[in-house]
């Protein structure tokens, strides 16, 4: 079984710039907007931000 090609790591190895976003908002709305925004990478910081996951 073959694994999918990781475009991010291949770009880094080839010296290509990768533009990303550091997010500290815990919101499914903002996550959905950011997911489709076209960044090469997104880091969701839930450790160092004063947010809590909402429980329904």
Image (tube, helix red, strand yellow):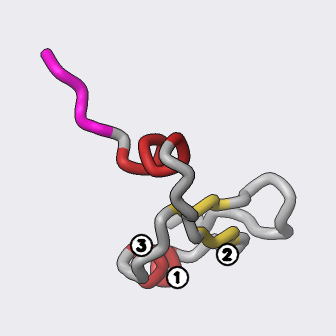
Q: Which residues are magenta?
A: 1-5
Residue placed farthest to the left in the image?
1
Q: Main secondary structure of the magenta part?
A: loop
Residue 35: which numbered mark, if any?
3
Point out residue 9 in the picture as x, y percentages from the top left corner.
48, 42
Secondary element at image label 2: loop
Secondary element at image label 1: helix
How packed mark 2 is, by other alpha carbons closer than 10 Å (few <14, some 14-19, many 20 or more), is some
Placement of 27 over or under 41, stated as above or below: below
Numbered disc in front, either 3 or 1? 3
- Residue corresponding to mark 1: 30
- The structure residue drawn at horizontal position 86% and vertical position 58%, both measured from the top left corner, is 48
- Residue corresponding to mark 2: 25
Q: How many marks?
A: 3
Distance Cα–Cα, label 2 vs label 1: 7 Å
Distance Cα–Cα, label 3 vs label 1: 8 Å
**Position of 21 compared to 14: left or right?**
right
Point out residue 23 in the picture as x, y percentages from the top left corner.
67, 71
Secondary element at image label 3: helix
The reply to whether dot 2 and dot 3 touch (C-beta < 8 Å) is no
Which sits earlier in the primary sequence, circle 2 or circle 1? Answer: 2
Distance Cα–Cα, label 2 vs label 3: 13 Å
């Amino acid at each position: 079984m073959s694994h999918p090609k990781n475009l991010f790591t291949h770009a880094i190895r080839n010296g290509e710039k990768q533009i990303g976003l550091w997010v500290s908002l815990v919101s499914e709305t903002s996550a959905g907007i950011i997911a489709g925004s076209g960044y090469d990478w997104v880091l969701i910081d839930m450790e160092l931000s004063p947010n809590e996951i909402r429980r329904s």
